[in-house]
Amino acid sequence: MMQFPATRQSALQRLEEFLQEAPRYAARRNHVLPGHPQVSRLSAAIRHRLITEAEVVEAALQRYPFRLVEKFLQEVLWRGYWKGWLEMHPGVWEHYGVSSGRSAGAGDPEVAAACHEVAAGRSPSGIMNHFARELLETGYLHNHARMWWASYWIHHCGLPWELGAQHFFRHLLDADPASNTLGWRWVAGEQTRGKTYLATAGNIRKFCAPELLERAGGVGLDEHVVARAGQAGDPTVDDLSGLPEFPNEVGLSDPERRVAGILHDEDLCLETSPAAPLRPAVVLQFVPEPESPPSEPRTPWLELARADAARRAGEYFGCEVRVCRTPEELIQACSAGKVESVFMMEPFVGPLRDQLGDLPAELMRREISLVRLRRKWDSVLLPHANRGFFPFWNKVGRMLAKSGAEGLS
Ligand SMILES: Cc1cc2nc3c(=O)[nH]c(=O)nc-3n(C[C@H](O)[C@H](O)[C@H](O)COP(=O)(O)OP(=O)(O)OC[C@H]3O[C@@H](n4cnc5c(N)ncnc54)[C@H](O)[C@@H]3O)c2cc1C
């Protein structure tokens, strides 16, 4: 099996395997070990919804009492927290333009050269060079390594966080507009007022396996560095606009009506989604050209995951799955197939939503109705992400402890 599952089947297998270790997760998760045996390594599969958070949470709660796996569930919920927060603060995404290279310092050749060196693993710190290479080679970094590396980039090397976030976004298999942008903002001290994250040699020695440190040539951090002050409270953070609502259920589609489904990278499991009762004549898989080409490990991972999703959707709905590269191609395919109604899982704030652009308006212009769906999990839990993580967790954790996650998928 791949180290980072790229099909639904292998993600479910990895979940089963990981659950045997789940009660020990709280004590071991912060340690960075070769091969990362003590964490799930499911983030890319969850991010693209080969499996859903609801399935992961429900499987853990079927097997263990809540308190034994609480830390693991809490980490799974961090993802939804960031998603909900960014959805309610879309200006943060638009302003920083992490995916598009409009970020601070992008045009300065000196900054660009410094970023290039650190990103390629040619900096004064052995362990940070190791993580830089691990990211390029595997598309993955352990959470603690992401925090250390982002902190090194921002506070030790004095580089703009936006460019670091952009580098992560290009290379991570699990690249997610919310977790990545807000994770970097948090380390930079821009997400939570008064909080910045400084990587220290002591913390790295405590949590990094000695053999990794030895192989990497040691820590090599300047102990006198102090964290740069963040600018939490910039105007884009205050544009709380509420969470738009989308239906979580639809009835069986009218057999007389020609329906098409749109399948995309934000949700690669249409057959477990609210779209499951529909009977499309065709599924259109939206695979846009990326603004900047994704990295070596990310490209084959995404190809496998997309092919898996297309195969499952084709089998489940019993119809053809056709790839479309642009919104115009989607519209053409609908017009050519005399489609009267289209459904899709509503994408969250991020590049895919940006790339779909005027699709809803264009469909409407052609009198093709668009049904935008959202999983119950997102509709029920994400609106609580309007303050800090712990108020969020107090509400959603209590809900999950009481009722589990069944029915939220
Ligand atoms: C600077 C920075 C950038 C990050 N960028 C991303 C990103 O682009 N995509 C992404 O999915 N995660 C991101 N994270 C969060 C986290 O590092 C990864 O989700 C986690 O390391 C994935 O490994 P795992 O699946 O083995 O996690 P596990 O420890 O097994 O956790 C289980 C699941 O919980 C979720 N999760 C765990 N920790 C976090 C967290 N801190 N924030 C959000 N979700 C979490 C993930 O879905 C993960 O698969 C980032 C963190 C930082 C500090």
Image (tube, rainbow, N blue to C red):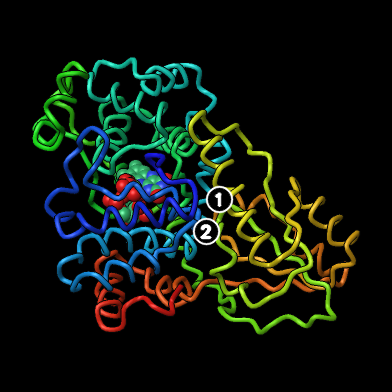
Q: Quadrant of residue 316?
A: bottom right
State the SS at label 2: helix
Where in the figure is residue 303, as x and y percent of width and height? Answer: 59, 41
Image quadrant where one finds the N terminus: top left
Q: Which residue is mark 1?
A: 94
Residue shown at 19% from the left, 48% from the top: 29
Q: Is residue 255 left or right of residue 247?
A: right
Q: Which residue is mark 2?
A: 90
Q: Is residue 84 above or below residue 228?
A: below
Residue shown at 29% from the left, 64% from the top: 389
Where in the figure is residue 318, as x and y percent of width and height? Answer: 71, 65
Q: Quadrant of residue 56?
A: bottom left
Residue shown at 44% from the left, 73% from the top: 377
The amino acid type of the residue labelled 1 equals Glu
Q: Residues within 10 Å of mark 1 (few under 14, many from 20)?
A: some
Q: Is residue 164 above or below residue 388?
A: above
Where in the figure is residue 145, as x and y percent of width and height? Answer: 26, 36
Where in the figure is residue 338, as x and y percent of width and height? Answer: 90, 67
- Spatial CA span between label 2 and label 1: 6 Å
